[in-house]
Image (cartoon, rainbow, N blue to C red):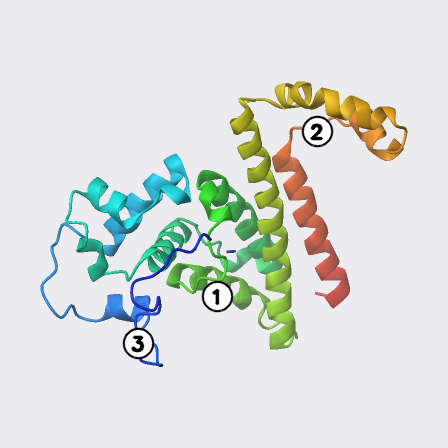
Amino acid sequence: MSGESGKSGKNGKGGKAGSGAPGPGLWERLERPAPAPRSAALTPGRIAAAAVAIADAEGLEAVTMRRLAADLGVAPMAAYRYVTGKDELIALMVDFVHGELELPDAAGGWRGTMRAVGLRTRALMLAHPWMARADHFSLTPSQFAVSERVLTALDGLGLDADTMMAVFRTVTAYVHGAVDSEIGLLRMMRKRGWTTGDETREGLAPEMTWLMGTGRYPATRRYLAEAQRKDDAAWRFELGLDCVLDGIAVRLGI
């Protein structure tokens, strides 16, 4: 279920600048036989793995073609035999990471499939936080494999094609929105040197104390006083996901 865009070489679409028509896309080019022998030491998988390692450690902004070449130990222009620039490099990274997502079998039906994909997507995004900034609308084989599995689970339930896609995108929107928020909080905590929920609440106490003291937010004050799962992000995510799936089931009678 299911970024930062850099300037691609040429026109970013694999075609010649000013030609008016895009050339073959990244995935078509990678499946074509190479026009000249390529070094066995450099492959799309190795390029993607190295770029993902940089992004995991230092963030998406640290991924540049020059840095990638240095980490791979190749000439600065070597990767351009596979990708035209950063846009395609990010697509390669997104595809590589989505390839790590284990697709559920059909035994759980549409709901079990979508729930499993949602939970596994959250785990994937938390393992690779830069994914929250990458382009969710990249067209990659591994992403299509995920959507194909979900749409196949929805097929045969009497839904028209538009409704099937709406269901898929609704669940995807929840997953990405919830995890984006979770990653944003973790990023803020890391920036301020906070490692736990207690440290975060202590650090935010002056602002929170003043806000609650105004008396304008009684429901929030009750939450702060009574909530037992403030730091249980996994429980909160699963509850929200189940609510979305419950709503779909009731609305569509499936």
Q: Please report whichever mark, 3 or 2, sits nearer to the chain's N-terminal start.
A: 3
**Callout 3: 10 Å neighbours few (<14), some, many (20+)?**
some
Image quadrant occupied by the C terminus:
bottom right
Nearer the camera: disc 3 or disc 2: 3
**Looking at the image, do the residues carrying marks 1 and 2 touch, with CB atoms under 8 Å apart?**
no
**Looking at the image, do the residues carrying marks 1 and 3 touch, with CB atoms under 8 Å apart?**
no
CA–CA distance between discs 3 and 2? 52 Å
Label 1: element kind: helix
Residue 148's mark?
A: 1
**Looking at the image, do the residues carrying marks 3 and 2 touch, with CB atoms under 8 Å apart?**
no
Question: Does residue 117 show up?
Answer: yes
Q: Please report whichever mark, 1 or 3, sits nearer to the chain's N-terminal start.
A: 3
Q: Amino acid at mark 3?
A: Gly
Nearer to me, 225 or 215: 215
Question: In the figure, residue 248 lies in which quadrant?
Answer: bottom right
Q: Amino acid at mark 1?
A: Glu
Label 3: element kind: loop
- Which residue is the site of mark 2? 229
Image spot of residue 31 (x, y percent): 25, 68
Left or right of 86 in this view: 66? left
Nearer to me, 182 or 1: 182
Image spot of residue 135 (x, y percent): 47, 56
Image spot of residue 131 (x, y percent): 46, 47
User: Residue, x 26% and y 52% (percent of image)?
Assistant: 45
Question: In the figure, residue 159 lies in which quadrant?
Answer: bottom right
Nearer the camera: disc 1 or disc 2: 2
- Which residue is the site of mark 3? 23
User: Residue, x 52% and y 28% (percent of image)?
Assistant: 191
Left or right of 74 in this view: 209? right
Nearer to me, 16 or 167: 16
Residue 166 against residue 172 in the figure, above or below: below
